[in-house]
Amino acid sequence: MVDYLRKLFDTSKRDVESLAPIVDRINSYEEDFAAKSDEELQELTLKFKERLNAGETLEDVLPEAFAAVREASKRTLKMRHFDVQLLAVYNKVYASAWSTSVMRPISISGSQVQAPTTGTPR
């Protein structure tokens, strides 16, 4: 009975498993972004802003943005973010989105990106 209750109330494993497809999506961009020049990688920031302004959701853009940040980190710091680090940041972004009526700006490649202020994350 104790094991059943523990499984019922322990959501951390379920939460991590539900985020696995997001990490897979982030990782799917890795090879493409590694082939981009530094200039092309920097241009992605503007493209992300344009996509958000055109109505795409943060959920649509974030995995690609995280992949770009990961690649920039690999080039500048010579370190690659672990998948669990990406999950933590992704979860924090969405926790902030749910706890405030207006999403705060997030930084991508050193530039501020204003997330849409209407609606809520899916």
Image (tube, rainbow, N blue to C red):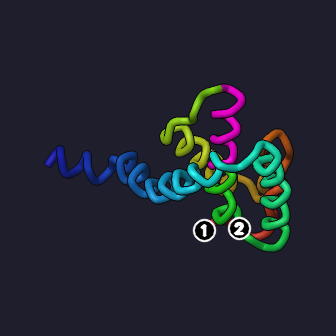
The label on residue 69 is none
Looking at the rendered structure, the kind of residue marked 1 is Arg
Dot 2 alpha-carbon crowd within 10 angstroms: few under 14, some 14 to 19, many 20 or more: some
Q: Residue furthest bottom?
A: 55
Q: Amino acid at mark 2?
A: Thr
User: Would you say the magenta stretch is mainly helix, strand or loop?
Assistant: helix
**Relative to 78, residue 50 above or below:** below
Identified at 17% across, 44% down, the residue is: 2
Magenta region includes residue 81: no
Which is closer to the viewer, label 2 or label 1?
2
Residue at 57% over, 51% down: 31
Secondary structure under the numbered disc 2 in the rendered image: loop
Q: Position of residue 121 (x, y in %)?
A: 65, 65
In the rendered view of the protein, which quadrant contains the C terminus? bottom right
Local packing at callout 1 (Cα closer than 10 Å; few below 14, some 14-19, many 20+) is few
| Residue 66 visible somewhere in the drawing | no
Residue 111 percent location from the top left of the image = 85, 44
| 67, 78: nearer the viewer | 78
For the point 63% across and 41% down, which residue is it?
70
Q: Residue at x 79, y 69 (%)?
A: 118
Q: What residue occupies the far left of the structure in this picture?
A: 1
Q: Which residue bears the numbered disc 2?
A: 57
Residue position marked by numbered label 1 in the rendering: 122
Tell me the magenta residue range.
67-77
- Quarter-of-image position of residue 55: bottom right
Q: Earlier in the sequence, mark 2 or mark 1?
A: 2
Give the secondary structure at mark 1.
Answer: loop
Query: Is 50 positioned to the left or the right of 1 in the image?
Result: right
Q: Is residue 51 left or right of residue 85?
A: right
**Label 2 with label 1: CB-CB less than 8 Å:** yes
**Where does residue 14 sit, x and y in percent of width and height?**
37, 53
